[in-house]
Image (spheres, rainbow, N blue to C red):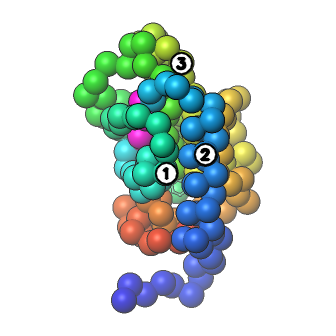
Amino acid sequence: MLEIPSYFQQLFTAAELDDRIGELAAEIDTDYAGREIHLVGVLRGATTFLADLSRRIQLPLSYDFIAVSSYEGSTSSGVVKLTKDLEESVESSHVIVIEDIIDSGLTVNYIMEMLQSRKPASLALCALLDRPHHRKIDIELNYTGFKIPDRFVVGFGLDFEQKWRQLPDIWAIN
Ligand code: IMP
Ligand code: MG
């Protein structure tokens, strides 16, 4: 058994995450009814969320991944770099970007601007977590799992120094 340090505080259980992800999938099903969608997951934090969300969506879909670097440890450097591009073109697709968490907004702003320039049929943003306290740029979130307090979080794909991604629940660490 993986031991959880005593200073970790549980924010969301796997069951709560599962329920909310089901609701987000239902919203997406309604909004995109009759269309095909293309999910773009942001590596690596969004993989768990994308895996669960995609399995709850009833519409035809495809997905692809993109990677950027912008974070060192737990503080943002503010510089965003593309480290892995998409495999497929997004031109004329209904694209939904899938993120784990929006903090300053700089990472996702860079991704949204880049994808918009590639002429998708539509472009939306879905983030599991929204921590608005340190936003540096205005971000329009089309789908949000949970707003969270100003705490660093791990689990369900989110890491601290590449660890703890495998935890099924989300924990705040201080
Ligand atoms: P932003 O560019 O400041 O919005 O940072 C967003 C990115 O930083 C996310 O895609 C995460 O990968 C990472 N990040 C931000 N906050 C946390 C956190 O609390 N835990 C783990 N990763 C985080
Ligand atoms: Mg990320």
Query: Could you tell me the amino acid type at mark 2?
Result: Ala
According to the picture, the residue beneath numbered tag 2 turns out to be 26
- Closer to us: 134 or 24: 24
Q: What element carries label 3?
A: strand
Q: In which quarter of the image is the N terminus?
A: bottom left
- Closer to us: 47 or 77: 47
In 3D space, how far apart are the residues under numbered discs 3 and 2 (Cα atoms)? Answer: 19 Å
**Coordinates of residue 161 in the picture (x, y in percent):** 40, 62
Query: Could you tell me the amino acid type at mark 3?
Result: Ser
Instruction: Give residue 122's mark.
Output: 3
Drawn side of residue 66 relative to residue 133, left or right: left
According to the picture, the residue beneath numbered tag 1 turns out to be 56
Q: Which quadrant would residue 140 be assigned to in this image? A: top right
**Coordinates of residue 158 in the picture (x, y in percent):** 47, 59
Instruction: Give residue 90's mark.
Output: none
Q: Residue at x 57, y 29 (%)?
A: 32
In 3D space, how far apart are the residues under numbered discs 1 and 3 (Cα atoms)? Answer: 21 Å
Magenta part of the protein: which range?
38-42
Mark sitting earlier along the chain (1/2): 2
**Coordinates of residue 128 in the picture (x, y in percent):** 58, 50
Q: Can residue 45 be seen in this view?
A: no
Q: Quadrant of the C terminus?
A: bottom right
Q: What element carries label 1?
A: helix
